[in-house]
Amino acid sequence: MGVLSTGRPLTWNEIVPYRSILKNHALNDLITILNKHRHRTNDAFLWGDEIEYSLLRFDHKTKRVQLLLKADEILSKFNQLDSNELSSIMFHAEDCNFVIEGIPSIPYGSFFFHYNRVESNMKLRREQVEKFLDKNEYILTISAFPRLGCNRCTYPEYESDPEHSFEHSICCSDHYKTPNYPRTMFLNQNVVERRQSKVSVNVPILKDTNTSNPFRDDFSSYGVSNWKDYVNNNLQDNYIHLDSSSIGWGCCCLQVTLQAQSFDESLHLYDQLIPLTSIFLSLSTSCPIWRGYLSNVDSRWNILSSTTDDRTNEEIEKNLLNSSRYSSVPCYLSDSSDIYNDTNLNIDQEVYQILIQNNCPSTVAKHFAHLFLRDPLYVTDEQVHPKDNPSNRFAFENQNSMVWNSLRFKPPVSEDSASLGWRIEFRPMELQITDFENAALSVFLTLLTRAILSYNIDLRMPISLVNENMERAQMKNNIQTNKFHFPTQIFHDRNCKKHETREMSMDEIINGSTNFIGLKSLVVNYLNSFEDIDTSTRQTMDNYLHFISQRANGTILTNAMWIREYVKNHPLYKHDSIVNEQIQYDLIWLIQQIANQKQSLPNTQPSYNKL
Ligand code: ADP
Ligand code: MG
Ligand code: MG
Ligand code: MG
């Protein structure tokens, strides 16, 4: 998660006078990177996933499950291990102390048998963390803990304390944040100070037969007598209210980073991945419950986007910044793709001109000039005085890593010419209950990029339609109820200036139809063109493809749909939208058993049986 730098973190008011100096450092750093690395070629195809794991603790007597605040302790124990024990995996701190990120320490390469290692590496990460967990403590891959933000949802328990909380949160205590990780506190505090208001998000409730009408969210149990005005002014009828960065950053996701051979290939790959962001979000949605209520959304995306939004009211109203710094991709990168950039993109004109003067291609310059509109939010005193400290060479990295788009364009680090090339990080996916599913999505995505490059596939379509698809992907039961804009003719045609799109079901996009080949067939054809794939690896890939295909045609429910169905059929559910402690306990316990293969999901998910 970005670059950790030493020094004393600055408050927002302390950052303000240094903003332009810091942006200049970052811009100079970027120009150095472009000059040094723009013409590097023949970098290896490398890739790897990132999983944000949740730590949980079950109390079987009281039938409760809570988020376990122990990531810092586990990370410090890892630091004491000898390097052999962790040779193929690595862990990072996250914003909340109940989340720990795990990655393969050495990226995968282009050998097919590497695809067969993904799932076992994910499993190894779980097992390694489990060694440091006590009885009744577990590590799971869930994207949003159903009752996060309810009273006492963590272990140890903490009452929220809006009076003294840095973000005045009624829902979450500051103790949820990872201690000794100053980036977290300061980043979130600076978001609140910059925007000049509390985090405030309203999520539509799912209206069930016994849900009160209108539904009015209830904060009476939080002891918020001093916050009555806030509650009255910010709650909306028929919406669940959330007011903490911990609810956004407490969400966990699945990311995949891919290295391109060259700068030009990285632009091409980035552009081809743009239309796939909403498709993979849709396939992976897993967040139907917010603060203990069934909601009308399936995904974390817009909620996380709102809880990290540092824009002032004025910037929003005057459209000075037309999206949160956590949002869908703002624009395509290649000059030939600029015709698809059909939305109004705010840019820093000065940054744009300087980049153009330094021979940066114009569409890439627009991307960075948009990125540079964001103010730095986590800065230490050492970064402000770079001459005294070489860490300033990460100035661009610091700017880039604090903008959270559905894709991240990751240039090589300025000083490091050997190991890191031009990379793209694919960031929209939500986590799945099982390693099988997480591996299937990661491998399918990666193979799809190989097929796209091999067959000269062109998936580009107007960015406004990509944005529309991102909204559709988050709606309740989106795979079954929605269609998505998608290009009809995906084989590159030099005579075609701009591809047509039409609305397609997820089934058609993945599995094809008489008029459309489907993304799965591209991957199958690509695999069939190699004779030397070993049988075990090919079997693994075929299992993954079968799963993706069934998810797309609705035979296998998304995790979001399955979780909602589970709650609706639970004997204690009163059809009032409320997911109480015991329903949550039963749900998460079942998820634990499925993840650890002691149970299979009900018949709605046939292929889970053979996991
Ligand atoms: P961040 O948090 O900045 O997105 P991480 O270091 O947590 O990045 O994860 C990066 C992922 O990229 C890991 O899966 C890692 O194995 C993989 N990776 C490392 N080096 C490369 C590379 N040169 N090319 C592609 N992927 C890489
Ligand atoms: Mg990442
Ligand atoms: Mg992370
Ligand atoms: Mg990471």
Image (spheres, helix red, strand yellow):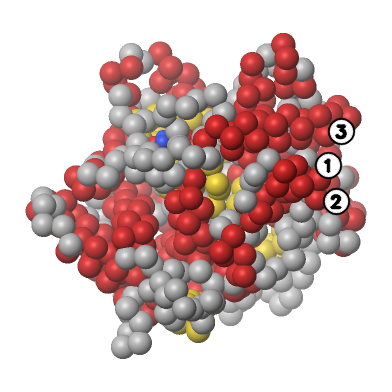
Nearest the viewer among 183 and 491 is 491
Identify which residue is drawn at 64% across, 36% down: 30
Element assignment for label 2: loop
Q: Quadrant of ligand 1?
A: top left
Mark 2 close to ligand 3, CB under 8 Å? no
Could you tell whether 241 is left or right of 511 in the image? right
Percent across and percent down for residue 471 are: 60, 69
Nearest the viewer among 123 and 333 is 333
Q: Amino acid at mark 3?
A: Val
Q: Amino acid at mark 2?
A: Thr
Identify which residue is drawn at 81% across, 29% down: 21
Q: How many labels were placed on the picture?
A: 3
Could you tell whether 558 is left or right of 178 in the image? left
Q: Nearer the viewer, mark 1 or mark 3?
A: 3
Element assignment for label 3: helix
The C terminus sits in image quarter: bottom left
Q: Which mark is residue 312?
A: 2
Mark 3 close to ligand 1, CB under 8 Å? no
Q: Which mark is residue 16?
A: 3
| Earlier residue among tags 2 and 3 | 3
Identify which residue is drawn at 41% across, 20% down: 78
Q: Mark 1 highlights which residue?
A: 194
- Real-space Cα separation, disc 1 to disc 2, in angstroms: 7 Å
Q: Is 397 situated above or below 215? A: above
- Real-space Cα separation, disc 1 to disc 3, in angstroms: 9 Å
Q: Amino acid at mark 1?
A: Arg
